[in-house]
Structure formats: C-alpha cells, structure tokens
C-alpha cells in the first residue's frame, strides 16, 4: 500500500498565468489571493500535507517574489523540517526556459528528482481551488497497478487553448485522450493533476528531451498512451479551475454557497495559509453586512452585500459594496458605490466614486491604484 511519505509533490506555480494577466502581472499564478485570506497555492499544498506528503517541490518562473514571501520556510504547512519539507525550485537560467513546456521544467529539476528517495511523484498545477484527499488516489493507483493515474472531473471543461479530454471505461482505464481547443460539455477533462513512479517520470522526461518534445500532455502521456497503463480517478467534490478573470470572480462568488464552502473547507482537511495576526473585523453602528465573507482586520461602516473582503479592508460611512472582491488593505471612501468590481491589494477609492461592471464582465482595478 502506497503511503503519503513515499510520495514527492511537484507543484507548477505558473501554469495558465497568461490567461489571467490582470492578476499575474506582479505575481505568479500560485500566489493569486482567494477567498478572503488564502492564495491558490494553499489548496495545492494543503491537499498534499493532509494526505501525508512531507516533501514538496514548487517550480516557479519569474515574478516569484510574492510566492516566496507567502511560503517562507513552509512552517505553516508543517514543511519546515530538518529532512525533506518544502523546496522552492526557481528558474535556473535561459537555457531551461520554463515557457517551453512542463517537460523542460521537469528536466531542469532532474537532480532534485534523481536525489529523492521516494518511489512516487504527484504532479499538480496551482490554478485550481479544490480539496482532494490524495490517499484515495494513492489507493486507486496501487490497486490498478497503474503507470500513470490522472485526476479528472466530469462536466463542462474550462475554456482554454488546450483542453485534455479523456475516454474512460467503467474500470477507470483511459482508452483515448484528446487535446483540443475551447470548452466541451459533459466530458471527462483533466485539471493538471497526476501520479506516477519517480523513476518512470525521469526516464520519460529524458526520452522527450532527447527528441525535442516539451509538452507534458501531448508528448509524455498521449504519445505513450498505448504502451502505458493509464488510469483516471474522478474528483467529485467542488473544484474551480482559474483559466480566465471571470473564472476567478466566479470561484470567489461560489463561496457564498454554504455547500460549496463545506466541500472546499472540510473540518477534517483544513486549508492552511500564512498567518497575519490582526484584530477581529469591526462593524460600525450604521453598518450592514449580508451574505459576505469578511476577513479579520476589516473595519466596516458602510453596506456590504454578496462580497469577499480580504484582511484589513476599510469601508467608510455611506459606501455601498455589492458583488465585489476587495483584496487586502483596500480603502473604500465615503459614499462610494461599487458593483461587480475586483480591486487588487492597496487600492484606494476616494469619496463618492461609482464603479460598476456586470456579472459576465466584472471590472478590475490594479494593485496600488487610486480611484
């Protein structure tokens, strides 16, 4: 039986970040803030730690300063230890440009993989908000004696340049694999998570590199589909893949549903994040808050409805917020009205401003702006 401590986690911090350029201008995909106090990487890391994995490598590209600041030594996730723990794997130079594809990224950490003692590798992107118990996936992988087990969802696939759609038989065996553009309804789509033997991965990456093949799904998996035993494990709990700015907004708004919150934050599998000690949220006498997520350190004197407020947000008297995502330390001036707005960190709205987007087109205000 495979155990978590026999698995290395490899997280790709930058996948799909070109799809949400508004949010990734000053940070990598993995450090995009979510849900009032979290970053996307918190979900990927917490899933691994809760499943017993205690060695995790995070592959980054440029703009990884905020990610390093957030992760620190890994203490929050109990990954600050004498042996194993958290490894940040930043870019090593122009000759291993990560943009070539995930295969060249894996080739650039060849020594890290080679020197590891664990038998298995679990690869995951950081562009998904989900809470998965990988112990069930480990069990499934062992029972099927699979070479590769990919994790998939059934439904409408995200609208990306390259969707991976699987044909899966009742036993979970992958019969076929299509890589296509755009979204597809009622299909089995992958969302960037799989498990395989460490040595098998090293051999396949070396084979791909020797042939100038860099795409993980097309060149490493699809090309070898007939020779390998590839199985698929279905994730049935709530999961949101962030492949556009609207996806990000919708994933935050989904937290208003208690059922979704229960699936993303179950009591037995908590999501850990960097601690910022702050006072509890403070509500003024004339304030009104309904159906919203309000983090600690907020001071609210206005009206807030159907919003996600991050730590330290100040909503002054007479301000009205509806369907908004307001990130850390923003200030909303007196009499200001916002609807369908996403404000990045440290934005200041002056008095009596009005800004409105639409459900299908929320407005974005960049970090540190003054409106």
Image (cartoon, rainbow, N blue to C red):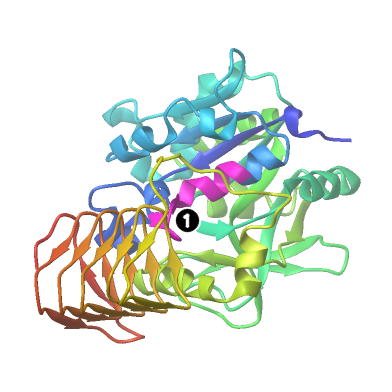
User: In which quarter of the view is residue 153 placed?
Assistant: bottom right
Q: Where residue 78 sits in the image (x, y, percent)?
A: 60, 29
Q: Where residue 140 sits in the image (x, y, percent)?
A: 84, 50
Q: Quadrant of the C terminus?
A: bottom left
Horizontal placement of 120 versus 244: left or right? right
Residue at image location 69% in from the left, 41% down from the top: 50
**Residue 93, placed above or below residue 160:** above
Residue at image location 42% in from the left, 51% down from the top: 15
**Residue 350, placed above or below residue 99:** below
- Magenta highlight range: 33-46
**Residue 236, placed above or below residue 273:** below
Residue in front for this viewpoint, 235 or 131: 131
Horizontal placement of 139 versus 132: left or right? right
Please say whether residue 125 is one of the residues in the magenta stretch. Answer: no
Q: Where residue 224 sits in the image (x, y, percent)?
A: 67, 49
Residue in front for this viewpoint, 300 or 258: 300
Q: Name the residue that disc number 1 marks.
A: 127
User: In which quarter of the view is residue 169 placed?
Assistant: bottom right
Horizontal placement of 154 versus 288: left or right? right
Horizontal placement of 269 versus 250: left or right? right
Residue at image location 58% in from the left, 79% down from the top: 156
Residue in front for this viewpoint, 149 or 242: 242
């Amino acid at each position: 039986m495979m155990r978590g401590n026999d698995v290395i986690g490899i997280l790709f911090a930058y996948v799909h970040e070109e799809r949400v350029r508004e949010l990734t201008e000053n940070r990598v995909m993995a450090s995009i803030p979510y849900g009032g106090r979290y970053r996307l990487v918190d979900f990927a890391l917490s899933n691994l730690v809760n499943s017993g994995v205690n060695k995790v490598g995070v592959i980054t590209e440029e703009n990884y300063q905020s990610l390093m600041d957030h992760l620190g030594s890994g203490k929050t996730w109990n990954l600050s230890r004498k042996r194993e723990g958290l490894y940040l794997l930043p870019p090593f130079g122009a000759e291993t440009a990560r943009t070539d594809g995930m295969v060249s990224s894996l080739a650039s950490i060849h020594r890290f993989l080679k020197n590891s003692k664990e038998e298995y590798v679990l690869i995951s992107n950081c562009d998904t908000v989900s809470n998965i118990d990988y112990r069930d996936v480990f069990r499934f992988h062992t029972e099927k004696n699979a070479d590769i087990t990919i994790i998939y969802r059934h439904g409408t696939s995200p609208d990306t340049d390259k969707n991976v759609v699987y044909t899966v038989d009742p036993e979970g065996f992958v019969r076929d694999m299509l890589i296509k553009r755009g979204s597809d309804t009622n299909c089995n789509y992958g969302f960037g998570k799989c498990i395989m033997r460490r040595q098998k991965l090293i051999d396949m990456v070396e084979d791909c590199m020797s042939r100038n093949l860099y795409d993980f799904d097309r060149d490493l998996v699809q090309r070898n589909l007939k020779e390998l035993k590839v199985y698929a494990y279905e994730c049935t709990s709530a999961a949101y893949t962030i492949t556009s700015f609207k996806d990000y907004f919708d994933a935050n708004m989904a937290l208003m549903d208690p059922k979704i919150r229960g699936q993303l934050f179950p009591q037995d599998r908590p999501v850990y994040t960097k601690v910022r000690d702050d006072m509890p949220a403070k509500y003024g006498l004339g304030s009104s808050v309904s159906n919203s997520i309000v983090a600690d350190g907020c001071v609210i004197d206005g009206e807030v409805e159907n919003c996600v407020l991050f730590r330290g947000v100040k909503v002054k008297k007479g301000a009205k917020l509806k369907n908004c995502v307001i990130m850390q330390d923003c200030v909303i001036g007196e009499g200001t009205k916002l609807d369908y707005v996403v404000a990045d960190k440290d934005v200041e709205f002056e008095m009596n401003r009005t800004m409105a987007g639409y459900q299908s087109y929320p407005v974005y205000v960049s970090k540190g702006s003054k409106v």
